[in-house]
Image: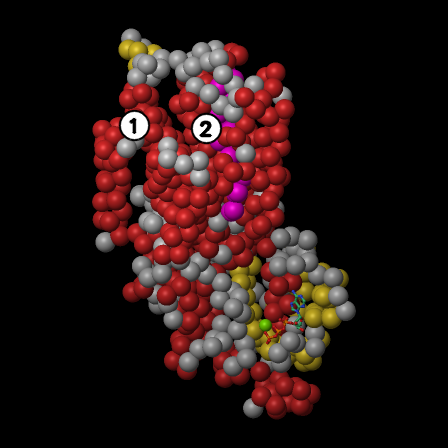
């Protein structure tokens, strides 16, 4: 059974059809990339899967359940975690606090009015573990709003990991990064996929990252699936070449 | 470093509060004024749980202050001359109203949220204003006084002694503010700040934003009810102005002036507001313009409030 099973999903904003009948199945343990030109509907597709807004039509099944009518918080609890194209963090909190809020949410402690439950649930250790995973241990007490763009992205990914997701969705994780930062993020994604068996869907414009990481690629253009297949198939696909890869190369 | 500094600030604040009746005369005040500072300070800090920590613009929070005041006053006037029961009644009424109003408005955001809180406050104001047979109407509810407090064999004469009442109010202030500091140090409190910082991120961490806002609203209203009850007891009097939008605005001014991002900021704001009001109003009717001027200067030169520079943490 697919982990994520999106069937003929459509999202229209007034007369603009941002996503027009996209079907996608993601198997457990898969690392999938979504590419496509600006305005193709990639982020809108993420918003549909993560529950930002309901689809105009079509079904979204996750882990065997129809989640189309659920809000974002409910989908997080089922195991869908995401990051945003424009970094969304808690800028005035420090790095450890950002991760702690996420970890405590995942542990069901968000309404806890004592300190004991968080201690018993091992939240301190959990935060340390996340800091180490994201390579942020030496910045744990820095305010996130003061960090570099790349470090803020890393915080956001670590927050998503704190949710112990079954599916991690990353919207252009390397956007705006230099070569070194891009390399670091790509390595983190690969490690999460290989070593922790995490299922990952990422939107990405950097083709080196895409072709290095992804097992399968879906190409969107104007809200429709232009092509779908392995990196080799996509690289050899003439429609994709013409519509997208050609112009960006 | 920040922890040490928070500790030093806390120490200073408590030392100042514990000795306030003694030094208040030196700046032209009196014991009752010190009590007023503590009571308004509690109200401003309670409001700031929403304003500064949760990021919810409750601009009609005098609703719960006034309900606490009427709850306490009417309990003594009509039911039983007991100070503890009066305060409990005031707190209960404010908490119940906070729960009901909160449930109706937590889905609204920004200015819509703010307008809704003001609107509900005005409803209660008009009820208190019009229903004079019970509330005393515009003249206020008189004909009652706070009762001495009996603690087992001991009796604390909070009716006769202004000083005794000050320390009584300070003890309840400490309980309220202590509860707030505790809450802010728990996972729930951290979550409130996270919601203030980035509601979208919080929602996509699986948090139920509306339920958090609601609970924060109820806690804030409850503490506001305590402040209101103490205010009624302090004056042995209550009138509809305790419920009105301008009273709400005064709490907002205190919080903003003192610093919404700092735990003690609203208390400092309340201190300045209450003292300036008292000193200036003995010279001119126009005390509000002086407060307004102070407020503008603070906002211009200390955009984060007077204590804004001291940082953002609650004492843990
Ligand atoms: N909430 C919205 N309301 C109205 N129109 C929207 C909304 N979200 C997206 N759109 C429109 O839908 C289309 C697809 O946008 P989307 O953000 O999904 O593209 P994208 O593939 O992520 O592009 P990019 O690579 O630039 O991030 C665009 O024309 C966009 O303007
Ligand atoms: Mg996008």
Tell me where residue A131 appears, x and y as whole percent. Answer: 36, 62
- Number of the label disc, if any, that sits on residue B30: 1
- Number of the label disc, if any, that sits on residue B107: none
Q: Quadrant of residue A76?
A: bottom right
Q: Is residue B64 magenta?
A: yes
Residue B237, can we see it?
yes
* Residue at image point 45% right, 17% down: B85
List the residue tagged with mark 2. Answer: B228
Considering every residue shown, the one lying at the far right of the view is A15
So how many labels did they put on this image?
2
Residue B171, can we see it?
no
Q: Which residues are magenta?
A: B56-75
- Up/down of B236 relative to A86, above or below: above
Q: Quadrant of residue A79?
A: bottom right
- Crowding at dot 1, Cα within 10 Å, few <14 / some 14-19 / many 20+, comes out as some
Q: Quadrant of residue A59?
A: bottom right
- Up/down of B33 relative to A90, above or below: above
């Amino acid at each position: 059974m697919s982990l994520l099973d999106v069937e003929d999903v459509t999202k229209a904003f007034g007369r603009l059809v941002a996503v027009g009948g996209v079907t996608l199945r993601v198997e457990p343990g898969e690392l999938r990339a979504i590419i496509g030109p600006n305005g193709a509907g990639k982020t809108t597709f993420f918003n549909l899967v993560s529950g930002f807004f309901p689809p105009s039509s079509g079904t979204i099944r996750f882990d065997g359940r129809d989640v189309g009518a659920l809000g974002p918080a409910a989908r997080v609890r089922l195991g869908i975690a995401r990051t945003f194209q424009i970094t969304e963090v808690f800028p005035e909190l420090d790095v450890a606090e950002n991760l702690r809020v996420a970890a405590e949410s995942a542990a069901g402690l968000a309404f806890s009015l004592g300190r004991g439950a968080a201690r018993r649930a091992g939240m301190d250790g959990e935060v340390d573990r996340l800091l180490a995973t994201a390579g942020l241990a030496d910045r744990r007490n820095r305010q996130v709003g003061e960090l570099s763009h790349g470090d803020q992205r890393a915080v956001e990914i670590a927050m998503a990991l704190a949710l112990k997701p079954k599916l991690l969705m990353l919207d252009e994780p390397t956007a705006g990064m230099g070569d070194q930062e891009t390399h670091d993020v790509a390595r983190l994604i690969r490690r999460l996929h290989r070593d922790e068996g995490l299922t990952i869907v990422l939107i990405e414009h950097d083709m080196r990252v895409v072709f290095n990481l992804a097992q399968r690629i879906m190409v969107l253009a104007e809200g429709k699936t232009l092509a779908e297949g392995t990196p080799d198939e996509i690289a050899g696909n003439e429609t994709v070449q013409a519509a997208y890869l050609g112009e960006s190369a | 470093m920040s922890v040490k500094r928070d500790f030093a600030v806390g120490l200073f604040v408590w030392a100042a509060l514990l000795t306030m009746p003694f030094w208040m005369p030196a700046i032209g005040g009196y014991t009752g004024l010190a009590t007023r500072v503590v009571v308004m300070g509690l109200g401003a800090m309670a409001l700031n749980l929403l304003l500064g920590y949760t990021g919810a613009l409750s601009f009609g929070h005098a609703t719960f202050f006034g309900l606490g005041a009427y709850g306490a006053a009417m309990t003594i006037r009509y039911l039983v001359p007991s100070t503890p029961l009066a305060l409990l009644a005031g707190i209960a009424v404010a908490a119940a109203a906070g729960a009901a109003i909160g449930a109706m408005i937590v889905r609204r955001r920004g200015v819509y949220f703010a307008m809704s809180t003001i609107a509900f406050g005005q409803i209660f104001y008009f009820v208190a204003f019009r229903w004079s047979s019970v509330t005393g109407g515009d003249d206020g509810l008189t004909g009652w006084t706070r009762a001495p407090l009996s603690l087992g064999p001991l009796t604390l004469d909070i009716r006769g002694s202004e000083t005794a009442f000050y320390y009584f109010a300070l003890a309840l202030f400490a309980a309220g503010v202590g509860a707030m500091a505790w809450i802010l140090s728990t996972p729930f409190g951290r979550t409130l700040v996270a919601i203030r910082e980035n509601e979208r991120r919080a929602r996509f961490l699986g948090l139920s934003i509306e339920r958090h806002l609601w609970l924060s609203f109820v806690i804030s209203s409850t503490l506001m009810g305590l402040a209101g009850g103490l205010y009624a007891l302090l004056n042995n009097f209550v009138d509809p102005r305790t419920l009105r939008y301008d009273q709400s605005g005064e709490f907002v001014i205190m919080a903003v002036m003192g610093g919404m991002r700092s735990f003690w900021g609203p208390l400092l704001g309340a201190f300045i507001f209450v003292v300036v009001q008292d000193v200036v109003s003995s010279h001119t009717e126009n005390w509000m313009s002086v407060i307004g001027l102070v407020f503008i200067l603070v906002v211009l030169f200390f955009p984060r409030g007077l204590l804004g520079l001291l940082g953002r943490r609650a004492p843990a």
